[in-house]
């Protein structure tokens, strides 16, 4: 009984993380029922993964940018532009795919460096720079394509969008072997990792999740992995892009948690001044963040182009909004400092399942947009509500954003030497200080 | 002439854990300039916020009588209706609006909802003439100097039919010439029947304008001195401001002072925006191994500015001067350079500049020296936890685990996290800016103990503090700053509160 109570109080303390996960499952169940089981048919699950892969790739970079307190509105245009560049390189110039792909990623890095320069070193807000980038790179896409689509692409590149890992059983087995091996292996690795982490936490006396919750959660995730493995294996196996995506998620989760760079990103988003005064090279970190975003946008553009088998003038339009929505639904905070790659992936999947489910139901894009918009609003609204209720929000978002921009203190008495000063005080102060 | 306009009786204001004001009494006569004096944090600003309705009438105890009628203000608007206007030390003007628009902001000269621009600008021009400011009322406020902006604030106050004008450190942000103009204006307004309360600790200003001085110390009224009774003298004011016993306890130290570690020479800094203001003038100081050096100064003396400009040029512009470590000149032009030369700076405002409040303890502690934890390209999370746990024990940080979010800790524990962060960076010189601000007495003693221990370990420590007893309790040597100048260097054996305050209020030659 006490274990149950402990679990419940833990759940309320993690309402957001748990809530988002539960929301995904409820949405899946809802559409599974509404579509008479079509949603979770093997072929559809496979489609779902491939269709959303490029949004998920963008969401990885986007959540990092958002954690640092910035935003990137240009990723859709950049993805479209790289699609166009790849079309020119591969179809017009006849470059081999293994030259063209690195070349495209390099162009993406250059695009990111261009934007990162203006944001980090010139100091123009990312919103403005990337809004300009949205227009600039859409324009460059149209110029590169001369307003016409480029098609067809060779088989090797198309595999990136719609290809599957080879079937080592030669197509004789009901379940595709390699997928089963990867799926089961992956599940085992996740279980192993979770248990190891729990041990380490206990060893260092850190707050641990209640055992009951840990067991349920881990078992559930493992079960989910196995179900997806089963569904994929009973269709055509593992999509290549899923392997790419899985590798990216693992790499970037590690990067954000355990690399100096990732830690600095969180530090900048959490308190820019404190990070600066702790020796974090904030400009360099911001610059690299946008270079990284450019590379990921290029990769998303390649996957998208490969899937359509054509580079199109309007390719990538609106991707930025889906990626941003994924990050926010996945728990990233508007004021920066909070968010995870895994959360953004779940946020992206929620958007993906909504899209896919509503398409199967025959709802037009009109209703799809309406519902997606409401989901985004509700998810972030829930966040704010939750924060206000727990009272740990640390004042208004806008207020704290403001505070950061004000100039250093002048040893002031007005900073009432009292810990529990009313929250309104700080906003007042921010409004009162000016920069002549 | 001696009719009271304002009587404040038994004002007591409590913040969680701190009594900011205790039974304060203030009597202001009609038509006088009344100065309020006290050290930083004595409660001057709090008292004025109580008077002007920033703190609503039910949030404190005591009575306020204005023109013999009781006041129950809930907002600033209520007090302004009665003719009490406060001008805060940070001006509240909108830089992009014109002078006239700012004067009538919230009090627009309008007919049926539409602004009457002709009237606005004409009336504004009349007010500007009253304060002696010859500027076109349509000039945007950002295009005039800070001194003139201060005058616009006063014009704004006059537009509200002010009877009692409260100026909170009005000259703190002004250069000498502008300060002089402002004081003249206050005297001029006095001639027109406006009563003023001026918060200041610049004794020369007080001597110039004040008819009466009320001294506040530790949230209590000490005494009111009257000019016509010949009581306003520098000695009397200083005695009133500092006459506090060394009541807190300080850890015993046996200083082992070694060679010079850091020396700053001819250090000068300009204000980042207002280039006419030199915030630090040719400051020189040094600190030796195992020594605790204090930096005393009143508001605007330039202590924080000096420290931050040395620490990676995080404050000011046109910085000149040299920094030597062990006799060799070093480059401290970026924070990471400063850290790599073994300098650490713990800020006075830990919430805004010191901590990532939404992050946990261990990640805050590791931030400044994260690279020490890197193994094979990745941050070793286990090692990080071990390190953080070590500091949690040695610094006595009261938190359930090192994974607790720093924003939820008390002020004292947050400060210990900040100190842990800098100790982990293993500095030779620690600059601690107001290390005990906003911390309760028990935690203060712990911080003093930590400072003593750091010095005993051979670190050179510089402590910036507004509390003189604190500096006298923990330092071996104290520098005093006044208006950006180093005005004194006092060995602890010769130091007293009166002596320090004398240097801190010394005007430059």
Image (cartoon, coloured by chain):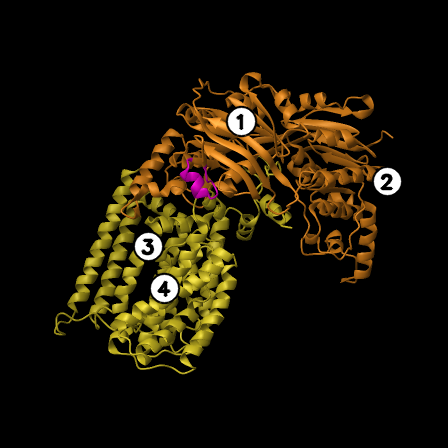
Chain colours: A yellow, B orange
Q: Which residue is mark 1?
A: B294
Asked if badges 4 and 3 are on one and the same chain, I answer yes
Say which residue appears at 42% left-offset and 24% top-offset.
B453
* Residue range (magenta): B330-342
Asked if badges 1 and 2 are on one and the same chain, I answer yes
Q: How far is the residue under mark 1 from the one under mark 2?
A: 45 Å
Residue A319 can be seen in this image: no
Q: Which residue is mark 2?
A: B192
Which of the 4 image quarters holds residue A286?
bottom left
User: What's the mark number on residue A295?
Assistant: 4
In the displayed structure, B329 sits above or below A243; it is above
Quarter containing the N terminus of chain A: top left
Question: Which percent across, then down, holds residue A215?
Answer: 26, 50
Q: How far is the residue under mark 2 from the one under mark 3?
A: 70 Å
Q: Which residue is mark 3?
A: A253
Q: Nearer the viewer, mark 1 or mark 3?
A: 1
Q: Chain of mark 3?
A: A
């Amino acid at each position: 009984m006490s274990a149950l109570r402990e679990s419940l109080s833990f759940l309320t303390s993690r309402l957001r993380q748990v809530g988002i996960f539960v929301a995904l499952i409820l949405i899946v169940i809802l559409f599974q029922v509404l579509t008479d089981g079509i949603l979770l048919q093997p072929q559809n699950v496979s489609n779902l993964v491939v269709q959303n892969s490029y949004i998920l790739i963008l969401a990885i970079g986007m959540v990092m940018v958002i954690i640092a307190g910035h935003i990137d509105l240009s990723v859709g245009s950049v993805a479209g532009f790289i699609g166009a560049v790849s079309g020119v390189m591969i179809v017009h110039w006849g470059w081999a795919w293994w030259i063209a792909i690195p070349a495209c990623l390099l162009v993406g890095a250059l695009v990111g460096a261009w934007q990162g320069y203006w944001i980090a070193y010139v100091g123009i807000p990312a919103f403005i720079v990337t809004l300009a980038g949205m227009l600039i790179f859409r324009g460059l896409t149209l110029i590169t394509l001369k307003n016409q689509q480029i098609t067809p692409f060779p088989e090797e590149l198309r595999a990136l969008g719609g290809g599957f890992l080879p079937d080592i059983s030669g197509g004789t087995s009901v379940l595709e072997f390699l997928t089963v091996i990867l799926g089961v292996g992956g599940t085992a690795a996740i279980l192993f990792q979770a248990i190891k982490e729990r041990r380490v936490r206990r060893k260092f006396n850190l707050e641990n999740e209640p055992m009951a919750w840990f067991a349920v959660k881990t078992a559930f995730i493992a079960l989910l992995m196995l179900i997806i493995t089963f569904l994929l294996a009973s269709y055509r196996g593992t999509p290549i892009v899923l392997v790419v995506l899985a590798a990216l998620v693992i790499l970037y989760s590690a990067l954000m948690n355990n690399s100096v760079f990732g830690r600095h990103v969180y530090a900048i988003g959490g308190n820019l001044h404190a990070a600066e005064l702790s020796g974090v090279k904030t400009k360099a970190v911001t610059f690299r963040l946008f270079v990284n975003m450019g590379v990921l946008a290029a990769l998303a553009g390649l996957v998208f182009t490969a899937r359509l088998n054509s580079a199109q003038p309007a390719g990538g339009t609106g991707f930025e909004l889906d990626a941003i929505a994924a990050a926010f639904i996945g728990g990233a905070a508007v004021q920066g400092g909070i968010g995870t790659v895994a959360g953004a992936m779940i946020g992206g999947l929620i958007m993906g399942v909504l899209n896919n489910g509503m398409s199967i139901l025959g709802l037009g894009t009109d209703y799809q947009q309406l519902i997606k918009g409401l989901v985004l609003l509700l998810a972030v609204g829930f966040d704010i509500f939750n924060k206000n209720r727990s009272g740990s929000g640390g004042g208004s978002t806008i207020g704290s954003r403001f505070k950061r921009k004000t100039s250093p203190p002048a040893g002031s008495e007005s900073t009432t030497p009292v810990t529990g000063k009313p929250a309104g005080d700080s906003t007042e102060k921010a409004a009162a200080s000016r920069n002549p | 002439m001696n009719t009271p306009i304002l009587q404040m009786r038994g004002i007591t204001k409590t913040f969680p854990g701190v009594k900011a004001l205790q039974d304060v009494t203030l009597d202001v006569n009609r038509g006088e300039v009344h100065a309020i004096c006290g050290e930083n944090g004595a409660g001057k600003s709090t008292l004025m916020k109580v008077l002007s309705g920033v703190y609503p009438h039910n949030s404190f105890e005591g009575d306020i009588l204005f023109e013999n009628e009781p006041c129950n203000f809930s907002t600033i608007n209520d007090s302004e209706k009665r003719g009490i206007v406060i001008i805060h030390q940070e001006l509240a003007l909108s830089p992009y609006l014109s002078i006239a628009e700012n004067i009538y902001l919230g009090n627009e000269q309008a007919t049926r909802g539409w602004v009457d621009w002709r009237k606005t600008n004409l009336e504004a021009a009349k007010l500007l003439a009253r304060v002696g400011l010859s500027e076109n009322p349509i000039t945007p406020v950002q295009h005039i100097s800070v001194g003139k902006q201060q005058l616009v604030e006063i014009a704004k106050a006059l537009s509200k039919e002010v009877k009692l004008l409260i100026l909170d450190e009005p000259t703190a942000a002004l250069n000498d010439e502008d300060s002089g103009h402002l004081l003249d204006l206050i005297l001029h307004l006095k001639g027109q029947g406006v009563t003023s309360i001026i918060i200041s600790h610049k004794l020369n200003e007080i001597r110039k304008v004040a008819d009466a001085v009320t001294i506040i110390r530790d949230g209590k009224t000490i005494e009111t001195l009257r000019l016509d009774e010949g009581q306003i003298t520098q000695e009397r004011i200083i005695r009133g401001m500092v006459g506090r016993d060394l009541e807190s306890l300080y850890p015993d130290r046996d200083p082992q002072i070694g060679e010079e570690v850091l020396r700053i020479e001819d250090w000068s800094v300009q204000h980042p925006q207002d280039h006419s203001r030199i915030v630090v003038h040719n400051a020189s100081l040094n600190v030796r191994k195992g020594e605790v050096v204090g930096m005393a100064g009143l508001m605007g003396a330039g202590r924080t500015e000096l420290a931050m400009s040395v620490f990676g040029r995080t404050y000011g512009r046109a910085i000149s001067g040299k920094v030597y470590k062990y006799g060799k000149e070093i480059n401290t032009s970026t924070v990471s350079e400063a850290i790599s030369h073994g300098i650490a700076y713990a800020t006075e405002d830990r919430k805004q500049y010191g901590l990532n409040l939404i992050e946990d303890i261990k990640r805050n502690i590791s931030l400044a020296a994260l690279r020490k934890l890197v193994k094979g390209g990745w941050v070793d999370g286990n090692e990080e936890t071990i390190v953080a746990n070590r500091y949690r024990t040695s610094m006595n940080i009261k938190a359930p685990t090192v994974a607790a979010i720093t924003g939820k800790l008390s002020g004292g524990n947050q400060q210990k996290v900040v100190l842990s962060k800098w100790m982990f960076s293993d500095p030779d010189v620690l600059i601690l800016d107001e290390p005990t601000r906003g911390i309760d007495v028990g935690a203060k003693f712990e911080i003093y103990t930590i400072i003593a221990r750091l010095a005993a370990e051979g670190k050179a420590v510089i402590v910036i503090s507004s509390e003189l007893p604190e500096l006298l309790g923990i330092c071996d040597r104290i520098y005093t700053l006044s208006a950006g100048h180093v005005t004194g260097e006092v060995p602890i054996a010769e130091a007293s509160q009166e002596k320090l305050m004398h240097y801190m209020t010394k005007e430059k030659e």
